[in-house]
Amino acid sequence: MKYSRHWRYLIALSIVTIFPPLAGAGAEPMDEIIVTADFRERPVNELPVSVTVLGAAEVEQLAVQHFEELINVVPNLNWSGDGHRARYLQIRGVGELEQYQGAPNPSVGFLIDDIDFSGIGTIATLFDVQQVEVLRGPQGTRYGANALAGLINIRSTQASSAWDARVQFTVGDDDTLAGGVAFGGPVAGRDDLAFRVSAQHYKSGGFRDNTYLDRKDTNGRDENMLRGRLSWRPGDELAIDVAVLYSDVNNGYDAFAIDNSYTMLSDKPGKDAQESIGGSLKVEWTGMRVATLTSITALADSDIDFSYDADWGNDDSWTPVTYDFVSLSERSRRTLSQELRLTSEESGRIFAGTSNWLVGLYWLNLEDELLTVNRGDYFDPGFNFADSLDDTFGSRYEASNIAAFGELEREFGDATRVSFGLRLERRSTDYLDTSGLQSGPSETMTGGELTLSHDHSRSLTSFVRLSKGYKAGGFNLGIVPAGRREFGAEDMWNLEAGIKSSLLNDSLALNAAVFYSRRDDQQVRTSFQLVPGDPASFVFFTDNAATGETLGLEAELRWYASETLELYANLGLLDASFDEFSTPQVDLSGRAQAHAPDYTLAAGVSYRHPTGFFARIDMTARDAFYFDVSHDQKSRPYELINARVGFEAERWSVQLWGRNLFDREYAVRGFYFGNEPPNFPNTLYTRFGDPRHIGVTFDMHF
């Protein structure tokens, strides 16, 4: 591993930490940020883990519509553009690139209002969102098997007893048109019962021009969201919160071009649609005095349609060869979960009042059904060769996870704390498919963490954390290469050390962490083309590498230089590699892992004048990264510039925004295979991220 090239960043970070800027001492202190994904919902500066938290104002300033627009701002977070919206995510280089078939087994947890959408986060639109949290590293005690790499937690705006309403309209190029409304307040004038309802519709063309069909919407976006929140406080000892959502995302999928451009030639453009309905019920009871009882019940039902034109062309593209393939998949997923935990209060502390504790139980049931149809025809008159494909594959999968967990935190004096967490999880599965495969493996997994944190002063805390995460093993479906039917469980050990600081009268915050991770029996999802010339014959399967290692750094600096000026800089460094691993196509031993850029960087400045004028500019950058493990092709480094300017009055605001202002072409996914008859030479095909996008947003508050 190439550790030496990172030390200059560590030295620079140390200098910034020890010798912070002296200006800005009179700036207003920043508001306290609470991390809701933690057991005890602690302030971010008290949480001994590398975490990024974006509040409602930041979310609205950094993004227009979807969570994927925030990814470049978060250190060491990446995504695979294998689908219209960001569904497959990587934290510190760990995460899936695609998951067309098989048992859901995500590495990155994804929650919306306590509802589990891990692996299917297509519906993560951002209107009326209160907070976005990204926890990096294994969450072995808190979330178990679905959070080997970390957790993303999205919270919509909570119901409040104060009346509030807003209306938002957005227009822009690419035929963008959006409208949203949100309102809430007390129910029937009661102070103990409040509600909030929000709804939004968003539509745009999708930045692709299909010249064969003479359409500009084959990759279009049609996204609808309806949320409801209810908060009931019937007494001092009981709190009940209900969240429901309905999402209908009906996006087109026509994103890959033969010439790696924004001009499509497909005659059967696909779709990437997800319709989900879900809800959660959170109950907290403090009547025992010594501990709080928390119950979280959540359920979700999702229908997902994913299809694409597998040859990316039409009859005219391949004349005189007939070459026409299409793939269609329908998936339905249902989840039901229940968590119960007891969390100690002040009077319930043990060991002479020095220690907090918690214990809990968790249960998750997941049902997943998949139907995939691949069809195609191939005829080459030059060789008088013809072939056709008409393949249907169906599967049904059910898994039950039962876990017991606990955490103990002991104080040594007023400044030092040691915490220990442990989770024991049992997973049972049942699988059946139309190819005759029937399997039901079960396994027991353990994870946890040991953390030492110390308050050097009121404004500086350091921590060291050793954690273990895990991910269940499983089996591969359909036709796979010999010896690849089953794969084993994976463990990750992670050691990190960091600081949380609040300086210059709380006007400057610096949070940073360095980490080392080791993955044993690392699961790697790769691909293999069974039939050369048949683009629908790719099979995706999971294999175990020997080990993988990662060294990295994350740092976030935020400075309120004055009452009108705010600056920030976020840095992620990553050196993630395989030790020994090879695929049928390439030997990956010693190579960097896929979708794990060496650096990610975000920086920006925001200015707000007392008269209401405001302006903001953000720059994000990331290094090149390997597209996959089945080949050795890489992206190119890129930088993007986003900006906003507008005016804000007491009850309304209007802003002109631009994303990717310099219209930079950058790849978010890449495949390397033969897709052009008659010779089918191996070629790198890339999917670009969004080009320049400009629009206007108007907000009115009542």
Image (tube, rainbow, N blue to C red):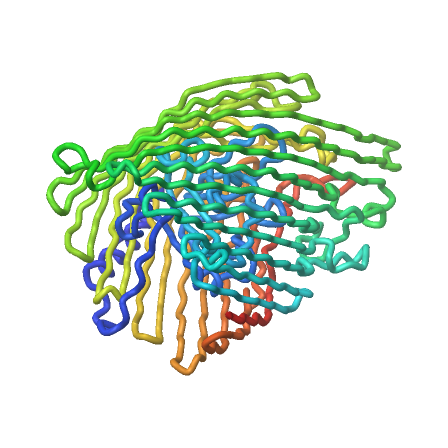
Q: Position of residue 28 (x, y in %)?
A: 28, 70
Q: Is residue 686 visible?
A: no
Q: Is residue 130 visible?
A: yes
In this view of the protein, which residue sits in the foreground, 207 or 483? 207
Vertical side of 631 occupied by 656: above or below:
below
Quarter of the image with the N terminus in it: top left
Q: Position of residue 333 (x, y in %)?
A: 60, 34
Tell me the residue at 40%/63% (across/down). 603
Q: Position of residue 555 (x, y in %)?
A: 32, 54
In this view of the protein, which residue sits in the foreground, 113 or 122? 113
Vertical side of 413 occupied by 435: above or below:
above
In this view of the protein, which residue sits in the foreground, 539 or 87? 87
- Kindly indicate the quadrant of the structure image that contains residue 571: bottom left
Q: Position of residue 414 (x, y in %)?
A: 12, 46
Left/right of residue 566 with respect to residue 678 in the rendered view: left
Residue that extends furthest to the bottom in the rendered view of this protein? 611
Vertical side of 244 occupied by 15: above or below:
below
Left/right of residue 315 with respect to residue 701 in the rendered view: right
Tell me the residue at 43%/49% (across/down). 232
In this rendering, the count of numbered labels is: 0
Tell me the residue at 45%/64% (across/down). 619
In this view of the protein, which residue sits in the foreground, 392 or 290? 290
- Kindly indicate the quadrant of the structure image that contains residue 144: top left
Tell me the residue at 64%/35% (across/down). 332
